[in-house]
Amino acid sequence: MIAILLSSIVAVVVAGGLTPPLIRRLAQRGIGQQIREDGPKRHIVKAGTPTMGGIALVIAVIVGYAVAHAHLGVNVSVEGLLVLGVIVMTGLVGFIDDYSKIKNRRNLGLTKSVKLAGQFAVALAFAVGVRLFTHHSTAITLVRISALHIQLGSIGWVIFAVLVVVGSSNAVNLTDGLDGLATGSSIFAFGVLGLLGYWQFRHPSVYGVSHSLDLALIAASMTGALTAFLWYNAPPAGIFMGDTGSLAIGAGLGALCLMMNLDLLLPILGGLFVIETISVIAQVFSFRVFHRRVLKMAPIHHHFELLGWPETTVLIRFWILAGIFTALGVGIFYADFISLGTVLK
């Protein structure tokens, strides 16, 4: 538990210390957010707000994780390094996309195909690395291998893992459309993963995830980094995380759940991200097939803005939804544990 707390505290300090000078540096160089031309008009005032704050997030996660290991002697796992690699490399894809937007002075960065290709390449490298260098199961599960699970085999699991990492990465990216929305919602998810990772560590005979403490350190570091970043990202935002942050956060969330055998619990823990993604899919499908929009604008948070809800109202209510989903995920996890009749330690 001390290692988890240390990684989180260090990440808070690093992200909190890096973000203000990053804001000043980005502002001096004129590196600001480009706003969607078809978005809510109230967002026009946000044009030029420093972006690419995800740089501070990624650095804080790495430092928090490293310091906890250096000072407390926790064993570094291949699984943990692979998850960190996903976070860093997907963040790099997002950085290139953000930089392209700034260079072109438009809200258009990399083409969709190039951006997706980069995400798929990182996800594939992660999935293949897991199969080559770890003994991770090829089954997908809800909370543990010995309970509900579906055996996929090596190739099937690699395909599944790639889709999970890319899907979760884009889901968080779609959610990152209001000040603090993706940041605050992600705090719930990673905070819970830190808790569940520690629970798995305390009950190895039940969950069989030998590297769970190492993964919990990453979740705790991400929670701390996001918490500090939210201080500056809360409305009115002084900085945006950009794709540098949102793609890295989403990919890290998916990779952690895969490594912790929480594959089927991911859509519940990240329920808000699922809703945002479904809203975009539904909008595109309806417009192309029926030539009608089901929402005033997608993702769904913009729909409620156009209905007249103030941005902070949308933000807080969506945070509440994110909290409810993560609480539901914890409830399912704990209910399964209680069903075993295991004595709490």
Image (tube, rainbow, N blue to C red):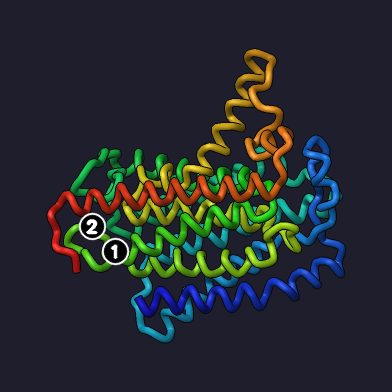
- What is the quadrant of the C terminus in the image? bottom left
- What is the quadrant of the N terminus in the image? bottom left
Comparing marks 2 and 1, which lies closer to the viewer?
1
Pointers 2 and 1 in contact (C-beta within 8 Å): yes
The residue nearer to you, when weighing 134 against 267, is 267
278 with respect to 152 (left or right) = right
Residue 285 in the image, given as x and y percentages of width and height? 60, 22
Give the amino acid type for the residue marked by disc 2 in the picture: Tyr
Residue 282 in the image, given as x and y percentages of width and height? 58, 26
Which of the labelled discs sits on residue 102, or is there none?
Answer: none
Mark 2 lies on a secondary structure that is helix
Q: Is residue 206 visible?
A: yes
Q: Is residue 90 visible?
A: no
Q: Residues within 10 Å of mark 1 (few under 14, many from 20)?
A: some
Report the residue at 47% width, 43% height from top.
271
The residue nearer to you, when weighing 38 against 120, is 38
278 with respect to 242 (left or right) = left
Residue 252's place in the image compared with 13, above or below, is above
Residue 126's place in the image compared with 22, above or below, is above
Report the residue at 42% width, 70% height from top.
217
User: In the displayed image of the protein, which residue is found farthest to the bottom?
Assistant: 71
The residue singled out by tag 2 in the image is 207
The residue nearer to you, when weighing 94 against 293, is 293
Report the residue at 63% width, 26% height from top.
283
Which of the labelled discs sits on residue 199, or is there none?
Answer: 1
- In which quarter of the view is residue 292 placed? top right
Give the amino acid type for the residue marked by disc 1 in the picture: Trp
